[in-house]
Image (cartoon, rainbow, N blue to C red):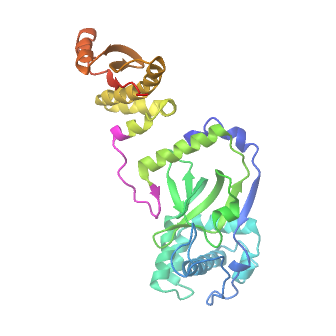
Amino acid sequence: MKALSSHAEKYLSQKHIFLQIAVTSERKLTDLKKIPSINFLDCEDNGATTMRLGKKDLQQFQKLHKSLLFYANQRLKIHKGGATVDDLLSAGPKKILKLRKALYGQTELIDDFIKENPYGFNSEELEVISSWKDHVKGRFFLIRYLKKYAVFLDDQSPPKAYGVLALTNTFEEVLGPVLPIQLEAVLLPFKNQIVYDGFLISYNIVFGRGIREDLNEEYSEAKHRFGIITSLPWKGVEERSDAELLKFYMKNNKTIMRYSEEIEELISKDPTLIKDYNRHLGQIHARKIRKKLRGLGVNDAWFAVIDGITIASGESKEQVTDTLKVLLPEGKKELPYIFHYKKTKT
């Protein structure tokens, strides 16, 4: 991830890893074919509550996911004492995470489960389990708590942002209110939504201001390119045009510095974008120049700038344009950004 390229090693060397494993009495199951009553915290009967699944969906998700884990352990024998789901889930984080890693590393186990259907699930339930082959696993940054979901930003380039629902407890209840949080997770599709599988590895890292700003820029880029992804598999959308990407990269001086390589690449790919480049750059410089002119009490006038240098001014746009025709050689006449400064009335 570009945002962390110059900072990550220093911070990760200080990491302290702890596990937030959703294996509580709520998740225990003594009989795979019979789901006992489960206690929920203010869950609605229908639909998702703030950032988490609704009661009925949660109950179904837990039933299906526990069943698949149990089946995988029966096949792989990672926890040999796991005669029941209750035994399996009490095996401890190390074995559970080993089993989970094996399951998502061998998705043919999911195909075998579907074929055998050992617990007599209906077609809709089997379809849900089959969809988990389209999981997304890796390292993420929990970067926002929104009303509908929490936003997980991946560490890929270009970055993608996922809207993820929690299970029994919200992510804020589990991980606390201070963001961002670096974590490892497996994201699963569930009924046109994205959930996590109940297991989180969270890194106890305090991010400095610089990294927080970088992550916010990554988040902005992800939203601009792809929007927030709220279902899996992500089929992809047509990215913004090169002109739109250039506009995003040139939002301000900071983004211009951050995305200097991307800007150069876009212009090399399409030289006609040089006109847009100068316009965006001119808009940034014009904001600064207006502020200085206002401080000097300058009267209404028109100005032309190139790369932050004011090369012409006049009482009208026509005067400035005529001056540029004299000043600039052919091929350069379209480079200036012309703007109108209006004196603020007091």
Region rendered in magenta: 228-244
Would you say 14 lies left or right of 190 here? right
Would you say 153 lies left or right of 249 here? right
Tell me which secondary structure the magenta stretch mostly adopts.
Answer: loop
**8 vs 309, nearest the viewer:** 309
Q: Position of residue 334 (x, y in %)?
A: 27, 21
The residue positioned 44% from the left and 53% from the top of the image is: 227
**222 vs 48, nearest the viewer:** 48
Q: Position of residue 268 (x, y in %)?
A: 35, 29
The residue positioned 76% from the left and 76% from the top of the image is: 90
**234 vs 300, nearest the viewer:** 300
Tell me where residue 22 sits by quadrant: bottom right
The residue positioned 37% from the left and 48% from the top of the image is: 239
Q: State whether residue 157 is above or below residue 340.
A: below
The residue positioned 62% from the left and 79% from the top of the image is: 71
Q: Which image quarter is the N terminus in?
A: top right
Q: How many marks?
A: 0
Q: State whether residue 22 is above or below residue 260.
A: below
**153 vs 178, nearest the viewer:** 178
Whether residue 144 can be seen here:
yes
Tell me where residue 152 sits by quadrant: bottom right
